[in-house]
Image (tube, rainbow, N blue to C red):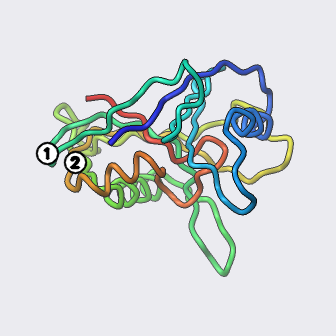
Amino acid sequence: MHAYLTTKETDATTLYAVHQFVWGLLPKMPSGVEAPYLFTMKGAQVLIRTPLPLDDTSKKEEIDFKVGDRLYVQVVLNPVKRSQGKECPIKGVVGLKDYGQRIFEAAGLRVLPMEMADEEDESSMFVRLLVPELENSKNIPIHAARYNASVEVVDVDIFQNALLNGVGRKKRFGCGMMLFRR
């Protein structure tokens, strides 16, 4: 299985402008059909993962794993919960880590304990709430947190699907795309 990873520079100053920038790179989709892509930001760079090559700068990314592979993953999530019919941000380190644990498990991964963990925190998952790096001019509710974790693949098919389709319920505006390294 493979996907294409493309890196583009942008001078967009709002999340919505970045979102529009990425949409402009994609082929036109029929009405009602979502474009198959994920993106995340790294400074002024936008990383885009899609099953379609966007241009000649697209790098083919082999997505070939086996059970037991150990990886380091990073993902930006929008940790929210439903309460009385409304979405509310999850707050507090314990709540954020529990949310991340559930997301990684649903993606076919097991979070590994840190080899040199702090006595009070044996998890290898690190969570950091992100102060919006880009102004949110459309008042789009985003409560973003970056998750970093050492993980082990426990279900290859689920993990590959998560890489291609993203994780978490909110996959817009740079959330949901897992970056990994072996």
Q: Do the residues bearing badges 2 and 1 touch, measured as CB atoms within 8 Å?
A: yes
Coordinates of residue 150 in the picture (x, y in percent): 27, 38
Q: Nearer the viewer, residue 175 or 55?
A: 55
In the rendered view, does 153 fall on the left or right side of 63?
left
Mark positioned earlier in the residue sequence (2 or 1): 1
- Please give the residue where the numbered disc 2 appears in the rendered image: 153
The quarter holding residue 144 reads top right
Q: Nearer the viewer, residue 178 or 92?
A: 178
- Report the residue at 52% width, 47% height from top: 176
- Please give the residue where the numbered disc 1 appears in the rendered image: 68
Identify residue type, mark 1: Gly
Image quadrant occupied by the N terminus: top left
Image height of 98 relative to 64, above or below:
below
Coordinates of residue 10 in the picture (x, y in percent): 72, 21
Helix, strand or loop under label 1: loop
Disc ID at residue 163? none
Q: Nearer the viewer, residue 97 or 65?
A: 65
In the rendered view, does 170 fall on the left or right side of 181?
right
Coordinates of residue 182 in the picture (x, y in percent): 25, 29
In the rendered view, does 37 fall on the left or right side of 24?
left
